[in-house]
Image (cartoon, rainbow, N blue to C red):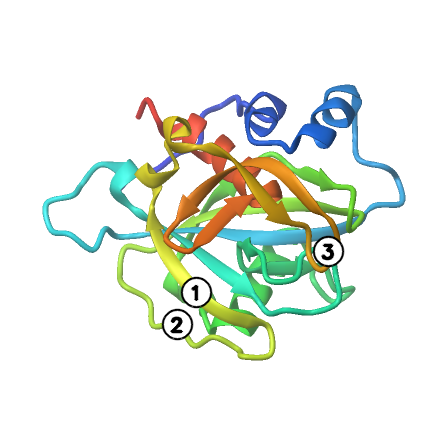
Amino acid sequence: MDIKLPPTLPGKEAHLKMAPSPRVITLVQELAPPAQARESAVLVLLTPPKLAGREQLLDWELLLIRRNTYDGVHSGQIAFPGGKRDSEDPDLIATACREAFEELGITRDSFTIIGELSKLYVPPSNFTIYPVLAISTEPICYKPDPREVAEYLTVPLNRFNPAYSKICRVQAGSYEWVEAPGFVIGEHTVWGATAMIISELWQSFASV
């Protein structure tokens, strides 16, 4: 399948649709991430549909992970594979690829990079996330690192239709409970930065 990002990404417009209420105000006012923000990258990987005869892009599967529980704001959350940029990484695409290999054993030759979605600043952890979009035309054998990944899941992109979103009560790591728009996938809730990135992905391809 030939997948291309649109020449102009929806960016903040799409992020705002799935932003938690406290973040909406700051995101509207934000012109750029703070200079002291740390850089990180995630791999937004699409894989072939499990059901035969499903050829539309929105039927393709989106790879997500559930992070292990730890003392931090993103403890136990559903996320994309990824993490902070190391000094040895030549660029942020390399960061996303390295993290995907470390967390799930995904080798660089098993997928094709399509491009980058809009960067997104996450105030609680002071990271700017750079989402790297990729596609694999063949099924991938995942080997989760139990130190970082509690489980992985692949979800058809059409499950993230904005019409299916709802206001959810979620726990921000081991800290306070908040209400935020999200998607309920089985026993999991996809919200926060992950849902905001998915919102842009959906809006970019819903009309394809």
Where residue 65 sits in the image (x, y, percent)?
A: 49, 61
The label shown at residue 194 is none
The label shown at residue 142 is 2
Q: Is residue 185 left or right of residue 131?
A: left
Query: In whole angstroms, how far apart are the C-alphas of marks 1 and 3?
Result: 20 Å
Q: Which residue is mark 1?
A: 152
Q: Residues within 10 Å of mark 2 (few under 14, many from 20)?
A: some
| Marked residue nearer the N-terminal end (3 or 2) | 3
Q: Of helix, strand and loop, which one carries label 3? A: loop
The total number of labels drawn is 3
Q: Is residue 108 left or right of residue 85?
A: left
Q: Of helix, strand and loop, which one carries label 2? A: loop
Where residue 91 sits in the image (x, y, percent)?
A: 67, 54
**Residue beneath the point at 59% across and 29% down:** 15
Amino acid carrying label 2: it is Tyr
Q: Residues within 10 Å of mark 3 (few under 14, many from 20)?
A: some
Q: Are marks 1 and 3 in contact (CB under 8 Å)?
A: no
Query: In whole angstroms, how far apart are the C-alphas of marks 1 and 2?
Result: 8 Å
Quick one: 175 or 74, which is closer to the camera? 175
Amino acid carrying label 3: it is Val
Question: Mark 3 against mark 2, which lies toward the viewer?
Answer: 3
Q: Is residue 202 above or below residue 74?
A: above
Question: Mark 1 against mark 3, which lies toward the viewer?
Answer: 3
| Marked residue nearer the N-terminal end (1 or 3) | 3
